Amino acid sequence: MEVSEAKRLKALEAENAKLKKMHAEHMLDVATLKEMLGGNC
């Protein structure tokens, strides 16, 4: 693996971790809203 490929892989891994965190936060928001609405959704 070349240096440029390793750097690209690191960048993609960092972006993936960021997106996973955003998704988890979104799912918590959805769960909270459903709970606030009485879980009828």
Image (cartoon, rainbow, N blue to C red):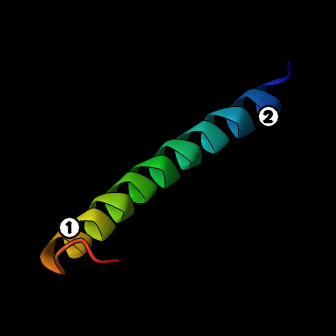
Residue that extends furthest to the bottom in the rendered view of this protein: 37
| Quadrant in the picture for residue 11 | top right
Q: Secondary structure at mark 1?
A: helix
Residue under the image location 73 percent in, 39 percent down: 8
Horizontal side of 7 relative to 30 (left or right) equals right
The vertical placement of 33 against 12, above or below, is: below
Which of the image's four quarters has the C terminus? bottom left
Quadrant where the image shows the N terminus: top right
Q: Is residue 34 shown above or below 23?
A: below
Residue 18 in percent (x, y) is at 46, 50
Left or right position of 12 against 21: right
Q: 36 or 40, which is in the foreground?
A: 40
Residue that mark 2 sits on: 4
Residue under label 1:
32
Amino acid found under the numbered disc labelled 1: Thr
**Residue placed most toward the observer, 8 or 30:** 30
Question: Horizontal and vertical percent for residue 29?
Answer: 27, 68
Name the spot of residue 6 as percent of width and height, x first. 73, 27
The spot of residue 28 in percent (x, y) is 28, 59
**For mark 1, does the 10 Å Cα neighbourhood hold few (<14), some (14 to 19), or many (20 or more) residues?**
few
Element marked by disc 2 = helix
Which residue: 18% across, 69% down?
35
Q: Is residue 24 above or below residue 26?
A: above
Q: Which sits earlier in the primary sequence, circle 2 or circle 1?
A: 2
The answer to which of 39 and 36 lies nearer the viewer is 39
Residue sitting at 16 percent across and 76 percent down? 38
Task: Using the image, determine if residue 2 lies above or below residue 16.
Answer: above
Q: How busy is the neighbourhood of tag 2: few (under 14 within 10 Å), some, or many (20 plus)?
A: few
